[in-house]
Amino acid sequence: MTTLKQLEKKLQKADTKIAGLYLFCNFISLLLITAYSAMMLSPTVLLVLPEGGDSRKQMTAIFVLALFGCVVFTIYASGLFFRKKAKQLGTLMALGASGRQLLPGLLKEVLLLSSLSSLAGILAGFPFVILLWNSFRLFLTDSAQMVLKFDFKCLYLSAVFFVIVVAFSCANAYRYLKRTNIMEVMHEEHRNEPVKELGAWCAPAGILLILIGAGLGYFAPYAYEELFSAFPPAWLNLLYAPVFAGLYLIMLHTVVHGWGSRKKHPYKNLIARSMMKFQGKQTVNNLLVSTVLTAGTAFAIFYIPMMSVGHTMEINSRPYDYYYHYRADQKVFNEEKISDLAAKYDLAIKDYKLAPYLSLAMDGTAIVEDEGQNFHYEYIPFLEEGKFFSETAFEAFTGTEISVAPGSYMAVSNADETGLYYLNSQATVLTNMVTHNTLSVSFAGYAHYGLLVDQRGSYILNDEDYETIAAGITPEWAGNTVSFNMDGKDNYLFAQDFFYTFISLFGPECEYPIYYDRVAQYQSQLNGEIYWGDTERMTQVSYSEPDTTDFRYYWTYMPKIRILDQTDYLRTFSVFLMMFLFIAIICSLAAMIISYTRCMTIALNNRYVFEDLKRLGASPTFLKKEIKGQAGPVFKVPTLVGMTAMYLLYALLMFANDGMLTGSEIGGMAVCLLILILLAGIYYLIYRYTVKSMCRQLEV
């Protein structure tokens, strides 16, 4: 005699495919979330990505998108599993089993499947990260900084996601067993989920909502600061919500109406359209999640060309092969020593130029933080340090004629005037930090010379004003800038020798990052406070680690050496670039797997439709066309919408930064477009593979 438990096991074995799909969905979701969180919290990444910087914010924002996608994906997988499971439950109920009798066995099965797949995904996440990261090191670039380290606190995020998976699975199990209509339960898997048919207005409304949400989310923090004199709270990010509502309407329009005109051929693709419409709820949800993940992929991958193209164009635009500056109290290279070093490599230098400068204190108005999120603006007499050239020295160094009126100063920017963030255009008093003599000044506009642009800020004074304020200054507060070219082709070994020798000539008093401001430190002393740069909040640089990203990017006296910057770019910024490439791979994998799973689900749910079409005499060509009609929108719409929306949004962000698109930004966006075309090609190949899998599943 067959017992209830034996019958349950037989029915479970009969539907191993859907159980396998459920296991696969949970496994993939936990693997991706674990891999992402492991990288996001890895000391390897956190030591390079500056705290509070845009790169960390972007990384976190994309993680939220990925988390949202994977949560929806697992909920969908759970619902699909129980829709198929409903037939088993209905059969057992028809034989007299009650929900109370079935609950222990069902919960045991659900807990076992959920736990095993989730734990396997968590455990597989770390080997996946190691394999992918070491592949980057092997085939792309490698450096000492790319040695991968884990902080296993990342497992907290995986644990939270694991709880979500199990909780939804158990909740679904309880919900299905509460049903009393046996026939409804048995035919659950054939139940359609049509969406409410809205008018054609939902497409333009969706586009409008996306624009409104993007505008509100981007500009609201600035408006909040102006209105309330406070830093924007995290909840302001909810203003991006209309973007998701707009995406939903666009997906809904895709499912209900499509994007082609049906007036001339109202019956064209009727079967494919009807199948999609009658199962519209799940299709819309999947399209929305895939679109969000595809947009996250584009957002992550854009970081690489935008950074790389700008860097390459800046290097190529330099008028000199070598540029450096140093404090006057440091015994650094002069022209003779450079020539002697070059001679060891059978090289010679030319166009050697030197210009002295003064490091002066500048006053100004700055934001001062209050308790909580509030702040106020306050005049600070010793606000920041600036490098000041005389107009004669600037003309001799740059070859550009300039005239600075007495009692005024000019700031040095690049030709596009995009490097204004670090420049002080509000100063009214300059102070000699040795004698504390002052000079009253006013801002007189911008001069242009990109080689002098850095995070410290360079300025120009009238010759007489320069001599006046320079009286009594010591070498500690003065310095020189030097530039020269190589006479012929440069040599990387010479550049490397020059760089390491250059560092060795500096004393420990110059071992600090460029955003360590000696003038601001002096103001903190006057206020009886500890300067933030003297705390652990400040990123440290060390002469003993000259090849790290922190040193090459942040050291105050880091030289600009064309051949070194070109050759060592990938190695210097490897962690930055590889992290965002890793994120793009994670998001794109998630999007493709979700789209593939949805298409295979369509094949499973609509098998009886295709069987009926075969009996009616439909040819394999016709059936394949209908399969493409189902799979096409699942892949094409998220790809087109996600990529297009993110491309336009990224261009808007670039424009909003400084009110223009610079040459490097235009070049970067062109490369981004090429990458999107390549990525779309990969999605197309997955689409082709998915169609073949659906055909095999439906025996077409």
Image (spheres, rainbow, N blue to C red):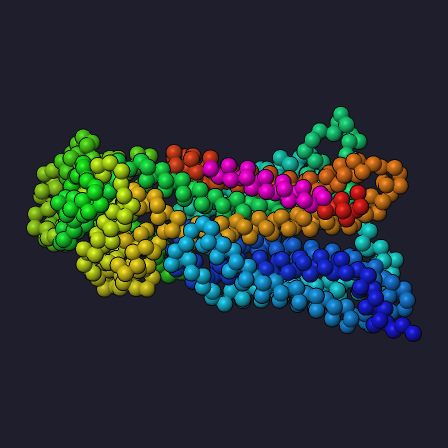
Horizontal and vertical percent position of residue 536: 32, 64
Residue at 35% in and 48% down: 568
Magenta segment, principal secondary structure?
A: helix
Q: Is residue 181 above or below residue 660?
A: below
Is 60 situated left or right of 465 in this image? right
Image: 234 above or below 309: below
Residue 377 is covered by the magenta coloring: no
| Side of 677 relative to 415 (left or right) | right
| Foreground of the two, 654 or 320 | 320
Residue 581 at x, y percent in the picture: 49, 49
Where is residue 213? Give x, y as percent.
54, 43
> Does 675 lie within the magenta span?
yes
- Tell me the residue at 88%/58% (across/down): 183
Say if residue 215 shows up in the picture. yes
The residues colored magenta run 671-692
Above or below, 135 against 446 in this view is below
